[in-house]
Image (cartoon, helix red, strand yellow):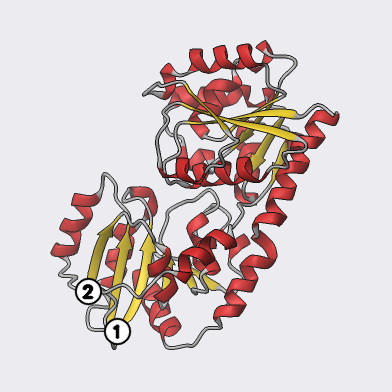
Amino acid sequence: MKKISVIFILPDLETGGAERIVTTIANHLSRDRFEPKIMLLRKQGGYLNFLKDDVDIIDINTERIRHSLRPILREIYRRKPDIVFSGFGEVNAYLSLFIKLFPRTKFIARETNVVTQHVTRKEIKFFYNFYNNYQRIIAQSDDMRKDLIDNFNIKQGKIVKINNPVDFDFIDAKLAVSTKPESFKYNYKNVVAIGNLSARKGFDNLLKVFSRLKNENIILHILGDGHDREILHQMKDFLGLKQVIFHGRQENPYQFLKYADLFILSSRYEGFPNVLLEAGACGTYSLANNCPGGINEIIQDTPNGEIADIENHEDFARKILQILHRDHDKDAIKNSIRSRFSKNIILDKYEQVLIDLMTK
């Protein structure tokens, strides 16, 4: 039987959500049925080390996404894959216009965000007029699916909802070698937040919340880097938050999640937040801002977390104190994630989408 050739497209394999998901899918597709390749605009990033040796990398060596279109189209024409799977919003948008040039190739877009929240540039929004050219569009959450149908007139039949997978084997291996961070003080509760230091992640609101908790024995550990780093550091100093620590980007964030008393997601919007899934996979209870992007699909009220409005700083601070005064069942938290989002459950759905596309 001829194998189905699939080319995945990403800007690079830096350690982000889309990159992790595509790496996981490419690694675990059945080699009896599929022949996966990954096309990168730039051959760089931490996930290169996790990619299986039999996944070919096509490096088109282009810095900017808008300049990548011609080499992407050239490679598709030259290689004639059965399926092109584009895994990054901006690339998806540009590519949609040219799909009809390749009638023998099926095209899939995996959307990474609630588009109306995330895409602000008019020229990129314009390309969403051609999104129905994709044979399939994968939405990670109900919020994302509804946004595409209501605001971009995407045909319902083209959209398949598949949540993000959690690689428990990978996380458990990391947890096994994770020791308690030195910054976790004895007699203090340790709260962890992780994400890019940008407005989208809402760390400004989180600092305002912690300005109400200055007299409590609670340390907030923020992991991540980004262009709002200086502003957030200044805000921390202005609010006199001595018990907030910015750790920058960490090679092993699971070390912090394993020993955290609480994980907080402060985002203004999400796609389907991997970090919330991974906190649960580490057995850590979560408090998440009530924002668009599948939060209510991940958090099952009280087994693994709670949802509250972070804009109400006083109320959110009270919630943190209430949660930190309760005990939580780590195994129950892990099981609530494993039973719904484990790698095998989700990857079977991806594989089925690819197979269905080739049999229609």
* Closest to the observer, 347 or 158: 347
Q: Amino acid at mark 1?
A: Tyr
- When the figure is inspected, residue 145 is found, relative to residue 4, above or below; the finding is below
Q: Which residue is mark 1?
A: 188
Q: Which mark is residue 131?
A: none
- Quadrant (top left, top right, bottom left, bottom right) of the N terminus: top right
Q: Residues within 10 Å of mark 2 (few under 14, many from 20)?
A: some
* Cα distance in 3D space between marks 2 and 1: 10 Å
Q: Residues within 10 Å of mark 1 (few under 14, many from 20)?
A: few
- The percent position of residue 165, horizontal first and vertical second, equals 61, 54
Q: How many marks?
A: 2
* Closest to the observer, 136 or 15: 15
Q: Secondary structure at mark 1?
A: loop
Q: Is residue 12 left or right of residue 247?
A: right
Snapshot quadrant of residue 44: top left
- Which residue sits at x=62%, y=22%? 130
- Which residue sits at x=60%, y=23%? 129
Q: Which residue is mark 2?
A: 243
User: CB under 8 Å between callouts 2 and 1?
Assistant: yes
